[in-house]
């Protein structure tokens, strides 16, 4: 969702430049102080956003040459958002995307990129089944989050000696749950970072983990309860593809994906006719040392 929102301004510029890409002296704004022609408007947009817009237009062309996204695919994504956000959907779209048509174009690009990423990522049947089982299970847990392993080991030693988990959370934990004993409430798969989730789902009620490192620091986790959700996420075969896509998304390395797209653009023999942008897709020559 955040990635889609970030792409809005750029995609809006794409639409505007695409509509103005022919030389035209047609007046698009009239004022008492003077008129603005379509040419002037285009030149200003080109100067401000031209490189970004051109890069996106070329990228979309290259991706569309190899992958296919149907209107039905986009419709399905829109419907999923409507189901997720309910009555808040219209306000959300207006605030983040302007209108649904802009959102549709952003989803179209996102799905093309997803296909490019997915063909290089393997997701096993076992991984999908594990995600399904986790999605139908929820865990009630507490944690203590600290910045370094030394402190984490110190806290774990005190827990092993019988000190109270909630008291140590209040004393040591660096996140907002500290004063509530580190309570996280119930959560399910996909709601916590992978390292935390993997540790928690390997534990039984009453277990306290060794320090678990994530991007946020070192966690010590206490599992209080494990239970099945009151309502299943659906039959396995019905949600299997959705779960596969979720796992693919988590495995995507954006640097690798960007390099793949860059390589595809190079293979497309892009010939830019606008002088100031002619070199934008040129790759720097590698030195012999780098190549070796």
Image: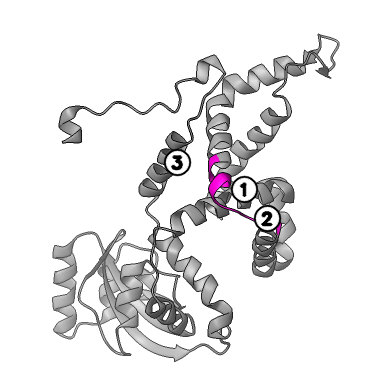
In this rendering, the label closer to the viewer, 1 or 2: 1
Q: Is residue 290 above or below residue 38?
A: below
Quarter assignment of residue 262: top left
Q: Is residue 208 above or below residue 152?
A: below
Q: Which mark is residue 135?
A: none
Estimate the x, y position of residue 219 in percent, counting from the top left.
Answer: 27, 69
Q: Is residue 142 above or below residue 285?
A: below
Front in this rendered view, residue 130 or 84: 130
Q: Is residue 223 above or below residue 64?
A: below
Could you tell me which quadrant the C terminus lies in?
Answer: top left
Q: Which mark is residue 106?
A: 1
In this rendering, the label closer to the viewer, 1 or 3: 3
Q: Residue at x 73, y 51 (%)?
A: 100
Categorize mark 2 by other alpha carbons within 10 Å: few (<14), some (14-19), many (20+): some
Estimate the x, y position of residue 83 in percent, counting from the top left.
Answer: 68, 69
Q: Residue at x 35, y 63 (%)?
A: 175
Q: Which mark is residue 92?
A: 2
Q: Earlier in the sequence, mark 2 or mark 3?
A: 2
Highlighted range, magenta:
62-71
Secondary structure beneath dot 2 equals helix
Q: Are marks 2 and 3 in contact (CB under 8 Å)?
A: no
In this rendering, the label closer to the viewer, 2 or 3: 3
Please name the predominant secondary structure of the magenta segment in the image.
helix
Q: Earlier in the sequence, mark 1 or mark 2?
A: 2
Q: Whole-Å distance between the Cαs marked 1 and 2?
A: 15 Å
Q: Residue at x 62, y 39 (%)?
A: 11
Left or right: residue 116 versus residue 214 is right
Residue 166 appearing in the image:
no
The residue that disc 3 covers is: 264
The answer to whether residue 64 is magenta is yes
Quarter assignment of residue 174: bottom left
């Amino acid at each position: 969702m955040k990635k889609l929102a970030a792409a809005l301004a750029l995609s809006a510029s794409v639409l505007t430049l695409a509509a103005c890409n022919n030389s035209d002296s047609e007046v698009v704004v009239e004022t008492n102080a003077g008129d603005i022609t379509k040419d002037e408007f285009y030149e200003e947009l080109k100067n401000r956003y031209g490189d970004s817009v051109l890069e996106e237009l070329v990228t979309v062309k290259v991706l569309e040459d190899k992958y296919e996204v149907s209107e039905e695919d986009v419709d399905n994504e829109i419907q999923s958002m409507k189901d997720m956000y309910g009555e808040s959907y219209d306000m959300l779209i207006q605030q983040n995307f302007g209108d649904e048509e802009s959102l549709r174009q952003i989803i179209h690009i996102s799905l093309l990129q997803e296909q490019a990423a997915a063909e290089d990522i393997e997701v096993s049947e076992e991984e999908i089944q594990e995600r399904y089982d986790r999605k139908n299970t929820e865990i009630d847990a507490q944690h203590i989050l600290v910045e370094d392993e030394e402190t984490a080991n110190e806290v774990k030693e005190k827990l092993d000696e019988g000190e109270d988990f909630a008291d140590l959370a209040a004393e040591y934990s660096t996140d907002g749950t500290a004063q509530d004993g580190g309570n996280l409430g119930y959560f399910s798969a996909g709601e916590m970072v992978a390292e935390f989730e993997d540790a928690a789902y390997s534990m039984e009620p009453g277990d306290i983990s060794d320090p678990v490192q994530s991007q946020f620091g070192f966690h010590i986790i206490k599992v209080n309860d494990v239970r099945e959700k009151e309502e299943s996420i659906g039959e396995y075969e019905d949600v299997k593809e959705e779960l596969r896509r979720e796992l693919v998304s988590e495995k995507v390395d954006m640097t690798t994906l960007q390099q793949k797209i860059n390589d595809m653009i190079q293979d497309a023999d892009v010939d830019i006719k606008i002088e100031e942008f002619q070199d934008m897709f040129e790759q720097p020559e590698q030195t012999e040392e780098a190549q070796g």
